[in-house]
Every structure is written in C-alpha cells, then in structure tokens.
Image (cartoon, rainbow, N blue to C red):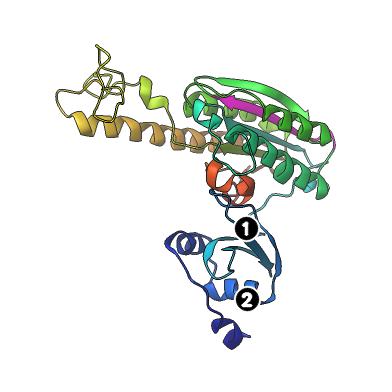
C-alpha cells in the first residue's frame, strides 16, 4: 500500500505541515486517508468554501474541495477523555470558560450569526452530545459554565451532563457579548471552582475557549509606572484612526510589549500551580486534563482536537 499511497498527489501548505508535526502524523497517513478513508462533508472555510473530511485508521484529514490540498489533520485518539469512564468512580467536573468579549459578536463563522452562536452550538454538539453518545451521563458528571469578559460570570453551576445542558448551551448562543476578554479573573474563578471540588471528583477538566489573546494588559502599568495601554488625553488618534496610547518615556515599545507578554506568563503559571495543588488534594485516581486556547473563527467546531492534553495524576 505504501507505493500506491505515495503516488497520490497531495499538496502540503505551511499550516497543514505544522499541525502534522505537532501531532506526529506522517504525510503518507493522509494519502492513505484520501485513498481508503471514509469521506464526508466538512465544515466550510471562513469564506464558505467547501471542504472534505476523510477518516482512516484513527486519523482525520481535512482537504479543500479538490481533495488535493491539505488544510489540517488530527488523531481521534490523541489524549481524548471519555467521561463515561468517570461516572461511578468519583465522577467528573468540567469547567467551560467561554470568551464573552465584544469580538465574539463578529459574524465571520459560516452558517452562524456570531462567533458566540458558533462556539455554543459546537460545545453543545461536539462536546455534550458527543459525550452522551459515548455513554457519559448521570449525576456524577457535572458541568460549570463561566463567561469571560471584564470579569468572570458563572452562568451554569454544576449542571448534569444531559440533553438539558446541551439545550442551555445552545440558548446562550443568542446572548450579547461585550467589553474585554480578561483571562486572569476567569482563570481565578475556574481554578477556584475546580480546587474546591478536587477531593470529590475522579476527573477534573478545564476547557478554555477564546478568539484572541488576553486583554488583562489594558489595565496594567509598565515596570516604570506608565499605563502604556491607556488612551492618551485629548482624544488623539493615530494615522490609522485608532486611539493614541500613553507612552513610556524610558522604553515605549519594549514596555508595551513586555506588559502584554507578562499577562501570558501569569496565565500559564496560574494554571500549572493550580494543577499541582489540585493533584495534591485530589483522590489517588484523579485526572486533570487541561485545555488550550482555541480559535473560534478557525476551528470552533473542532474544539476537541485543541483541547486535549495528557491528564495530570495525583501522586498520593
């Protein structure tokens, strides 16, 4: 079969190659997927362009309409968590953090009025309904929803994983997103909830979905004391029409960049510290899968492949 698949023409591009390298998928596996796999329509691209999905031997491969251009790929068994296994062995608590900032009102996801509508519909279908189909249900599996804007708001608190939860998530798709997307308050709230419940659960999971970088830096000052992300007095504008910001008189460009980067470092350290703390207080079989940030506009309906990680296990 190797000779046959290698003769199949398949054009690779930078994004597709990077995803394959990250996930340990050889190009030959994609060629095999196109030749021997199950083909079905995939979600359209940003501009509504048609795409195909091929599934073969545990690999999912997305191509353009011609089936010759690689878009992305992932492994079906790449660290996925089956919540059905958690029911009855300590149960599971999943905390969803969903960006509810103003950018989520944009209408750039095909077939959805807003990014908010897209992310909630995909959470309902590709998370809740998929887990129910796999056998995850019952009072031992609960979900908490936090919406992230300037502050963190708990919208759903420890709801059972069932059809009612899927309906509630879809209903949130019509909510009005606003203001900034501050990661740190949302992480604080999510990690506080998980830590408080760590001793009761066999599995803890955090899924964090956003369409952009943290906005927390907007309220911070640089190391020299200048609020470098605050609009300058006098309603001044740049050549591009954006508000002119206050400058640090010592190192204007570097200070603005470092202030923004510091927020990212704080977010990562906060999650890692909390995972270690939760593992120390959890039951011996506790699992702590951590989710990464996803892009709503590019891969909202495929959140699962970006929100999988090896679970943290308690050493106690």
- In the structure shown, which secondary structural element does the residue marked by tag 2 occupy? helix
Give residue 58's mark. Answer: none
Quarter in which the N terminus is drawn: bottom right
| Towards the viewer: 97 or 273 | 97
Query: For the residue carrying disc 1, how many other residues have a C-alpha within 10 Å: few (<14), some (14-19), or many (20+)?
Result: some
Coordinates of residue 115 in the picture (x, y in percent): 58, 35
Relative to 65, residue 302 above or below: above
Q: Residue at x 19, y 23 (%)?
A: 248
Write down the residue under mark 1.
Answer: 78
Coordinates of residue 257 in the picture (x, y in percent): 28, 34
Residue range (magenta): 138-148
| Towards the viewer: 196 or 300 | 300
- In the structure shown, which secondary structural element does the residue marked by tag 1 occupy? loop
Image-quadrant location for residue 153: top right
Write down the residue under mark 2.
Answer: 32
* Residue 279 appears in the rendering: no
Determine the CA span between mark 2 and mark 1.
Answer: 19 Å
Residue 106 highlighted magenta (yes or no): no
Residue 141 highlighted magenta (yes or no): yes
Relative to 268, residue 182 above or below: above
Relative to 256, residue 130 above or below: below
Coordinates of residue 36 in the picture (x, y in percent): 69, 76
| Towards the viewer: 197 or 163 | 163
| Towards the viewer: 31 or 194 | 31
Q: Residue at x 53, y 36 (%)?
A: 210
First in residue order: circle 2 vs circle 1: 2
């Amino acid at each position: 079969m190797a000779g046959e698949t290698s003769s199949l023409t398949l054009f690779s591009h930078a994004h597709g190659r990077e995803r394959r390298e990250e996930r340990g998928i050889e190009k030959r596996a994609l060629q095999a997927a196109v030749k021997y796999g199950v083909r079905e329509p995939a979600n359209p691209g940003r501009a509504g362009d048609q795409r195909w999905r091929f599934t073969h031997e545990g690999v999912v491969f997305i191509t353009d309409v011609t089936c010759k251009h690689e878009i992305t790929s992932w492994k079906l068994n790449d660290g996925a968590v089956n919540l059905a296994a958690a029911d009855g062995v300590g149960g599971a608590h999943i905390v969803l953090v969903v960006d509810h900032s103003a950018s989520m009102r944009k209408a750039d996801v095909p077939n959805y009025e807003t990014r908010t509508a897209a992310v909630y519909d995909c959470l309902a279908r590709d998370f809740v309904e998929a887990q129910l189909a796999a056998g995850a249900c019952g009072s031992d599996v609960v979900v908490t929803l936090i919406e992230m804007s300037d502050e963190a708001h708990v919208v759903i608190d420890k709801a059972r994983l069932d059809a009612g939860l899927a309906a509630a998530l879809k209903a949130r798709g019509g909510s009005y997103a606003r203001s900034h997307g501050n990661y740190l308050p949302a992480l604080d709230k999510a990690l506080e909830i998980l830590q408080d419940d760590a001793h009761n659960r066999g599995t803890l999971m955090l899924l964090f979905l956003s369409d952009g970088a943290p906005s927390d830096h907007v309220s911070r000052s640089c190391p020299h004391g200048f609020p470098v992300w605050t609009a300058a007095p006098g309603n001044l504008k740049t050549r591009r029409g954006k508000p002119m910001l206050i400058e640090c008189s010592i190192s204007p460009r570097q200070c603005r960049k470092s202030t923004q980067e510091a927020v990212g470092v704080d977010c990562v350290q906060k999650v890692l510290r909390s995972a270690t703390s939760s593992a120390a207080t959890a039951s011996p079989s506790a699992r702590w899968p951590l989710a990464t940030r996803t892009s709503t506009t590019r891969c909202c309906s495929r959140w699962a492949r970006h929100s999988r990680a090896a679970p943290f296990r308690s050493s106690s």
